[in-house]
Image: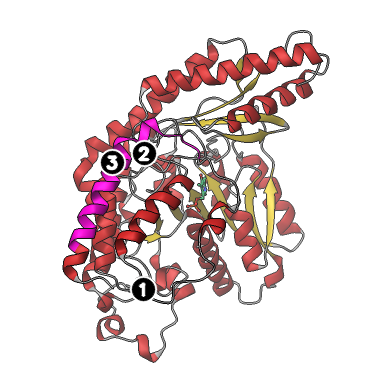
Amino acid sequence: MMDIEQFRKAGYEAIDRICDFYYRLEQKNVVADVEPGYLQNLLPAQAPEDGEDFKIIADEYQRLIVPGLTLWQHPSFFAYFPTACTFEGMLADLYASSACNPGFNWICSPACTELEVVVCDWAAKLLGLDKAFWNESKTGGGVIQTTASDSVLVATVAARSRYIRANPDADLSKLVIYVSSQTHSAGAKAALILGLTNRILDVTLDDNLALRGSTLRAALEEDMAAGKHPFILIATVGTTSTGAIDKLPEIFEVANDFPSLWVHIDAAWAGLSLVCPENRELCYLDRINKSATSFCTNFHKWGLTNFDCSVLWVRNRIDLTEALDITPTFLRSKHGDAGTVIDYRNWHLGLGRRFRSLKLWFVLRSYGVRGFQSYIRKGINLNRKFASLVRSSSEIALVTQPSLALSVFHVNAPMDAQDSISAQNSLTTAVYESLSARKDIQLTQTSVQGLTCIRFAVGAARTEERHIEKAFAIILEETKSAIRVFKMKGAP
Ligand SMILES: *Cc1c(COP(=O)(O)O)cnc(C)c1O
């Protein structure tokens, strides 16, 4: 067991090793070069009988664990959505864990709650969210959840509870959650967890995969006529697959006619683009401000804050507390009873919660609004660069319009291919497989209305133009070789 002085020494050493890791980041592979089960073979089957020296433990972290890490901070990481993290965030996590407490009530550690109240407002103002969503408003407010999936679940639970309070006789089995075919699986998961029906609304490539108001209206009317109870729509600003932005002006016009429908805006990734005023119209910020019931964005994706930090804002905090407030005697406190403080345990699913506001505070202060803006603009500009390289090539093509820092492309079928869609799909699959076999770059695949596609997501903090050029060159090289094989064999 470590004493304070041993901690000091091991702590300095840990920071040194982390710095070395970051200095060498670019020379390393993006993807871990290990096989499934690699670690089980290297570790004993149980914890040691007697405690071990920390030096050995730290060395084994270096030797056994680090090689099994996928380097999400690598400048050639273009998969999923990069989770840009910062040294400020790492230090905050260190301090937060030194103040270790479960944070469920204000009195658990007043600073933890109070800082969260303040930084959620800072974050709301950074994004241009209306004051209805600020904690300052005392009616709405923001809370840090673990993930955007938790935020969807919390919004759905709150919406269900609000609906049942207003319609006490409603048959619970007839409640319906609305999502589009592009909504993150968090929507389906919320339905699964709550045992509710999930109605999936169609979108088209002509609409760039955005949900339309008319589609929503037709479904709501049909379900109402069938005696069902629509109670929440999960709309998306920046879908995971292609970055599609649902047509919020149309959607809110429809929602006006269905006042009991909760509209949650899942902007897990694209929400951060709102820090730049030039993206606000594209993301319909005005409409969100005027009408959204809740809004969520992940600072742990494009927001420079170490995982996890998903901020959920609601227009009416009472919707959360009415749904989630259980206060047994042992959790009662003078301040909670008096209603003078926020007890965040009533704003999320669990009881205990980590001190996550500290990292958001460190990062927001260290970068400032301008720092955030230039980082977001850099990502968007790098993606523009990638998209223009794709447009200049005859071998690959964009499938949807590039969205902020995300492009989706596939391989063009050779002119003489008979069934061009199936040729395109098998070529794209072949290219994706060869890209996946490489360790020096990482991308993810997706499927868009039957088309096999590859996603290119910019956002790692260290990605520069040369990494974009290199990535494009690798993609092109793999594509050309897949096309050669295709032409030789008639199929890849
Ligand atoms: C990434 C993502 C999610 C899920 O994020 P978690 O925080 O991992 O739950 C949800 N919605 C969208 C649009 C996303 O891009």
Q: Residue furthest right?
A: 418
Which segment did they paint magenta? 8-31
Proximity of marks 2 and 3: CB atoms separated by less than 8 Å: no
Residue at the far bottom: name it: 329
Residue 122 showing in the rendered view: no
> What number is the disc on residue 274?
2
Q: Which residue is mark 1?
A: 51
Which of the two labelled residues, at mark 3 and mark 1, occupies the earlier sequence position?
Answer: 3
| Percent x, y of residue 26 | 37, 31
Left or right: 138 as drawn, with respect to 173: left
**Which element carries disc 1, helix, strand or loop?**
loop
Residue position marked by numbered label 3 in the rendering: 20
Q: Is residue 32 left or right of residue 27?
A: right
The percent coordinates of residue 33 (x first, y second) are 53, 40
Image quadrant in which the C terminus is located = top right
- Residue 404's label in the rendered image is none
Residue 315 vs 432, above or below: the answer is below
SS class, disc 2? helix
Please name the residue shown 54% across and 33% down the image: 443
